[in-house]
Image (spheres, rainbow, N blue to C red):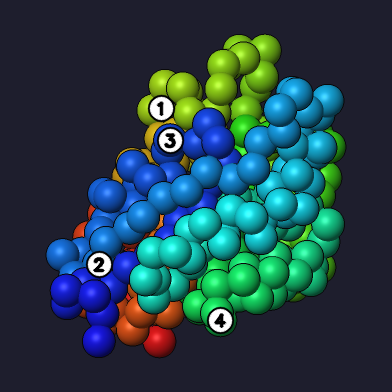
Amino acid sequence: MPLHGKQRIGLMVPPANTTMEDDFDRWLPDSVRVHVNRMFSPPTPAKSLVEALQAYGDHIEDTARTMAQVPLDVMAFGCTSGSFLNGVGYDAQIIDKIQGVSGGVRTVATAKAVADALKELGVKKIAACSPYPAEVNERLRQYYTDSGFEIVNFQPVDSEKYPMDYNQFPPEVAKDLALSVDRPEAEAIFMSCTAFKGAAESIEAIEEATGKPVVTANQATFWACMRALDVTEPIQGGGVLMRERVAA
């Protein structure tokens, strides 16, 4: 029986990511609560984003061990690039680490949650976008190609036009990029990065404009958590995935 009648999610996010917990709060049903912990951050700044992402995975057991002191029903590794960083199978390694120190609490990782959501929607050809630098985008394309998807078009955020942190983007950046990346042959649109501010708010507007399902990192992670909790009620504001595809 969940504590006090509520089921509980333990969400682990990169240190500066404020977007993901805001998005979870947007969708959270009354029967569920979310508890948040920050992933490990080196005492000296990482030399690259790849180095920082690697540190999240390398130290996730410490983060998860602290998080698991809360009586949780599901845990989530809330970083897309951090879970696809080293290819297909790396996400499973992270999940195994978390479950190993949490007593086997059900665990989801964002990169795999996205792949599972796209498969649930029955799509193979996707248009994708992200706010990442080139070296991370290469890994994104490899992971989702190896996961069985064809990326028919891909575009990153213009870093010269928008040099600020992902969490600080004006809300229209994600929406405009997702609309621009769409192609006739794309069956769905994928917006990567759990810190991509504005992505969640724009899901339903993009779906209405394109007639195609939209998958974002935070939406897919939340959807995977709801499935793990056996929450089957439709959730508004999260596109077709959460209105019609919540039940397993």
Nearer to us of marks 1 and 4 is 4
Cα separation, mark 3 vs mark 1, equals: 18 Å
Find disc 3 in the rendering and name its residue.
18
Residue for point 47% across, 48% down: 37
- Considering depth in this image, is 77 or 40 the residue closer to the camera? 40
For label 2, the residue is 32
Instruction: Measure how far apart labels 3 and 4 are at the Cα level.
Output: 27 Å
Q: Residue at x 56, y 81 (%)?
A: 104
Which residue type carries mark 1? Answer: Glu
Q: Quadrant of residue 118?
A: bottom right
Q: Is residue 161 above or below residue 179?
A: above
Choose top left, top right, bottom left or bottom right for residue 222.
bottom left
Q: Which mark is residue 104?
A: 4
Between disc 3 and disc 1, the foreground one is 3
In what quadrant of the picture does the N terminus appear? bottom left
Give the residue at mark 1. Answer: 172
Q: How many marks?
A: 4
Say which of marks 2 and 4 sits in front: 4
Q: Tag 2: residue type?
A: Val
